[in-house]
Amino acid sequence: MKILQTQTLRGPNYWSIRRSKLILIRLDLEDLADRPSNTIPGFYDSLIAVLPSLEEHYCSPGCKGGFLSRVREGTMMGHIIEHVALELQTLAGMPVGFGRTRETATAGIYQVAIEYQVETAGRYAVRAALRLCQSIIETGTYSPAELQKDLADSIELRNEAAMGASTDALVKEAQILGIPWMHLETCDLFQLGYGKYQKRVQAALTSNTNIIGVELACDKEKTKKILASMGIPVPLGMTIYSFNELKDAIDKLGYPIVIKPLNGNHGRGITIDIQDWEHAGIGYDRAREISNGVIVEHFYQGRDHRILVVNHKVVAVAERVPAHVVGDGIATISALVERENHDPRRGDGHDNMLTKIELDDSTSEMLNRQGWTLDTILPADRVCYLRATANLSTGGIAIDRTDEIHPDTLWLAERVSHIIGLDVAGIDVITTDITKTLAEADGTIVEVNAAPGLRMHISPSQGVGRNVAAPILNMLFPPGTPTRIPIVAITGTNGKTTTTRLIAHIFSQVYDAVGFTTTDGIYIGDRLLEKGDTTGPQSAQIILQDPTVDIAILETARGGILRSGLAFQHCDVGVVLNVAADHLGLGGIDTIDQMARVKGVIAEAVHVDGYAVLNADDERVAAMAKDVPGKVAYFSMNPDNPLVRSHVQRGGIAAVYADDYLTILQQDWVHRIEKVERVPVTLGGRAPFMIANALAASLAAFVQGVNVEHIRAALRSFKASVEQTPGRMNLFNLGRYHALVDYAHNPAGYAAVGSFVKNWPGHAIGVVGGPGDRRDEDLMELGKLSATFFDRIIVKEDDDTRGRPWGDAAEFIVQGIEQANTASTTIVPHSIMLNEAEAIEWALDNAPDNALVTIFPDDVSRAIALIMSRNPVPDEPEVMSLAELKPDSSPIYDPMVAGSNGKYS
């Protein structure tokens, strides 16, 4: 067996909408292609011996042991690797349960989708599962040592990828509240919300955090001064910058003292309860390792407390106890520390609820003060402190005291947060009794911290855990505040880019900053951010991450859905234009029905309060309605479409082409938007597929709240031009003849353009080609179709042959033309001119008067540049369509409206 390809899906995808984080592999079973598990000697027993916990997998039988019964009866190895990879992750502390295995059109090659929590660990689990199964097949076993190594490696990968406790709490709370989030890896920030409504956090630093407040909190001396000036009790002390100043400071303060760095955090470099000159020197050196400035303060006896203030309200209080162990009269202090570090709550750094206790010089110093060493057997119930400071980052524990704090201290802490100017503040208080006022308990405020850790409050070692993430999220997003900009996603086989651009143009009538992605680039308003085919999730994320964007209009192509999934969990409007034969045989998609499933991801991702805009004239698209979580609106070129009539009679919304008008039906009401001859993108109503695109765009805007007047104005001002729809029905007047450029590259696209070309009053010349990664029969179909609407055909080759030999795609197109000629009484002359630029130049040079030269280019920009070099007459589409074209031969349906605001019957 071997893995041919591995992909990571991070959003709703072909395999799953809800459980969308999947590793997808393409697996070649090789010599196991015809060997189900029941034909492999000893495999079942060995698999159970290695992973007995597979008994918990239900699989298709739907009961405990269901998967193992499939193995015993006989199932293919791809299915087994799926379940083993899931179980390895679960054993490593990442419980997952979703998987799918499907054989491709190539015998013995399977696609296997496996859920993951941590991407790197998921990819590792797939490889480990293959090794495990291969080992059992070849040797009859998989050693316990190898299994333990796999699990240890997986745990390490999990820990490396883990968010800190504070960030994790905020992200989980966002998920509960339905707020989308994403990790901005380039700057290690987390974004909550989309577009202009977004907020960013880095642990407990937020978009609302005041930089002046942070600077103050980081400068402990300035913090003390401003608090003291406002009547806040703070420790007596001073800041020194050289060892020579230390003695004077001690003489003024007297012992005991605490020495700490001026700019420090997490308890680093702090030495407390210093009673003599020798230890004062040690403390000074330790602080200087962190900061040039060193604070010398009077040491206050009492217990260490952290008061968490969010949006100037106290939300939690915790007593922090330094790292310690409790004796049992048997074990040494060293052994007790090792035992304590085995607590599953303890881990490295800030990733776990508690931090492992590390033994270092500070530990030795603390033990010396107590008259012990690491080898001392600690008496039963005797407490041995291992650190002087109570920070969780050095192994300390927390005890919740939220309900015990004195009201005066609570008020004082909230006042301090105002004085320093922090939206989230950790205020450190030393007091002998938190239930009394600071004055009564000889307490003091020793520090104010920006970006305070949250884990001591979320999961204290003792007492009630506090959901401190909730008030932070409520501060960032007060109740009723939007968290996400509207998302309109568009997919289909043909018409996506034009429809996307038209929808963006409509919304520009009512929004200041419309962000949209297309096959020709990423845009915000009229500004191009990035040129290229940008219809995948990474491009969509650029729009969703931009803090200036009001609404996202996202062209969503097949490739991105299959490679990575969607960039968003839900969209407000999902538009599915059509499904036709294109890209078949790629990415495991071999039939039109499978392609419909790919396109249907957009419909299934519609928010429960949103709309799916579906083509009622395409049975595969119309069938997607059953899987839409929200509402459905249909568009149709046929006002008598029975699905549309039934839908509207039930109170639904639809858009139809009726009586030469783009019309929206809403319950009993009819909204006539505009007559198609006044909609430039339809070329005066002579391009039926453009009318369908305009219907879809109008309907998408309407269900999202845009009024008819704005839609009408946008339709009138949007043209099939190089500026607004490059490569989409761009018609040029070159004086004695015309040229048309369209990026059609599949049979459905060719047929759509052909419906326009057939109505041309003069000679029709086609410069045709096809992408090399299409099936042979698809290329032949392009040739057959071309022969039905062109009078002469020049066959060229795309610059990028996508793996085919040069000229091979052109040969199959020619075969299609010749087959059409054989079956027809009219012979269409054709020739091969492989170089695209030369083929275009020849067609333009040899076009007769009144001809239409239609170009299906690989390089749209080059084709347009070649035409523009011949100085075409500008704004041709508006003046051309009604005056010169023959009447449209497509059927005109009976009108269904009584007037512009009539009732539908």
Image (cartoon, rainbow, N blue to C red):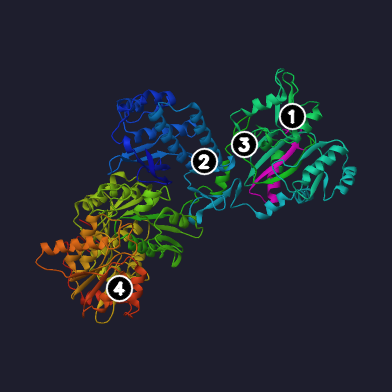
Which of marks 3 and 4 precedes in the sequence?
3
> Split into 4 quadrants, where in the image is the N terminus?
top left
Which kind of residue does numbered mark 1 sit on? Tyr
**Cα–Cα span, label 2 and label 1:** 35 Å
Q: Residue at x 80, y 43 (%)?
A: 285
**Cα–Cα span, label 4 and label 3:** 65 Å
Q: Where's residue 413, x and y in %?
A: 70, 43
Local SS, label 1: strand
Q: Quadrant of residue 721?
A: bottom left
Q: Tell me if residue 490 comes above or below residue 16 in the rendering.
A: below
Which of marks 2 and 3 precedes in the sequence?
2
Mark seen at residue 100: none
**Cα–Cα span, label 3 and label 2:** 21 Å
Q: Where's residue 771, x and y in %?
A: 30, 60
Which of marks 1 and 2 precedes in the sequence?
2
Which of marks 3 and 1 precedes in the sequence?
3
**Cα–Cα span, label 2 and label 4:** 59 Å
User: Which residue in the protein does label 3 denote?
Assistant: 348
Mark seen at residue 385: 1
Mark seen at residue 838: 4
Which kind of residue does numbered mark 4 sit on? Glu
Q: Give the label, 1 or 3, closer to the camera.
A: 3
Q: Is residue 421 magenta?
A: yes
